[in-house]
């Protein structure tokens, strides 16, 4: 189940990346250091839902790279926490950590509020998802 979810997310991510509209005609030039990816499981409690382990996406559109971040060459990541109700809709979407702060949180939260998953056997609490903003592209962390 987890492998199917990860493969479907990778396929969706690759498909969306291939169709992305770059908001500027100038090539993206990173001007900031990409912070090392966090170890998402290190932030979790044993009962928490971690990304693909319990989630199977129905509608999972990655956020758009924020225009200001793209124009200024900024890179970073966001760790989201969210709950999934019995219908598969996201609830209580919140930012756990983001680097750099104030750059990617809004786009990430806006996208996550629209995600829909296959209905879980029971509602899921504290699911953590890593979203990367790197080299002008958005991807799902592992």
Image (cartoon, rainbow, N blue to C red):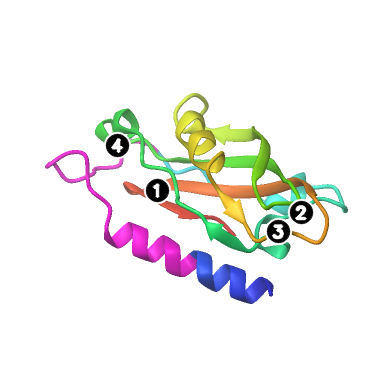
- Between disc 2 and disc 4, the foreground one is 2
**Secondary structure under the numbered disc 3 in the rendered image:** loop
Residue 40 against residue 99 in the figure, above or below: below
Q: Which residue is mark 2?
A: 49
Task: Residue under label 1, please give it.
Answer: 134
Closer to viewer: mark 4 or mark 3: 3
Tell me the quarter of the picture where residue 25 sits: top left
Q: CA distance from mark 1 to mark 2?
A: 25 Å
Q: Secondary structure at mark 4?
A: helix
Magenta extent = 10-32
**Which part of the image, by quadrant, shows the N terminus?**
bottom right
Q: Which mark is residue 119?
A: 3
C-alpha span from label 2 to label 4: 31 Å
First reached walking from the N terminus: tag 1 or tag 4: 4
Q: Earlier in the sequence, mark 4 or mark 3?
A: 4
Comparing labels 1 and 3, the label whose residue is closer to the camera? 3
Furthest toward the right, the residue is 46
Q: Quadrant of the C terminus?
A: bottom right
Q: How many marks?
A: 4
Q: Is residue 98 visible?
A: yes
Q: Which of pointers 1 and 2 indicates the residue nearer the eye?
A: 2
Label 3: how many Cα within 10 Å (few below 14, some 14–19, many 20+): some
* Residue occupying the point 52% across, 47% down: 131
Inter-mark Cα distance, 1 to 3? 31 Å
Residue indicated by mark 4: 70
Left or right relative to 120: residue 109: left
């Amino acid at each position: 189940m987890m492998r199917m979810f990860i493969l479907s997310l990778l396929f969706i991510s690759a498909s969306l990346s291939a169709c992305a509209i770059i908001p500027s005609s100038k090539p993206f030039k990173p001007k900031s250091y990409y912070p090392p990816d966090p170890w998402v499981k290190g932030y979790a409690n044993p009962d928490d839902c971690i990304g693909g382990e319990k989630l199977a996406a129905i509608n999972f559109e990655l956020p758009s790279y924020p225009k200001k971040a793209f124009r200024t060459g900024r890179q970073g990541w966001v760790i989201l926490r969210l709950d999934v109700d019995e219908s598969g809709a996201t609830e209580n979407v919140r930012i756990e950590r983001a680097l750099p702060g104030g750059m990617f949180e809004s786009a990430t939260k806006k996208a996550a509020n629209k995600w829909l998953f296959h209905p879980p056997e029971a509602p899921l609490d504290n699911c953590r998802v890593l979203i990367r903003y790197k080299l002008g592209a958005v991807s799902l962390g592992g």
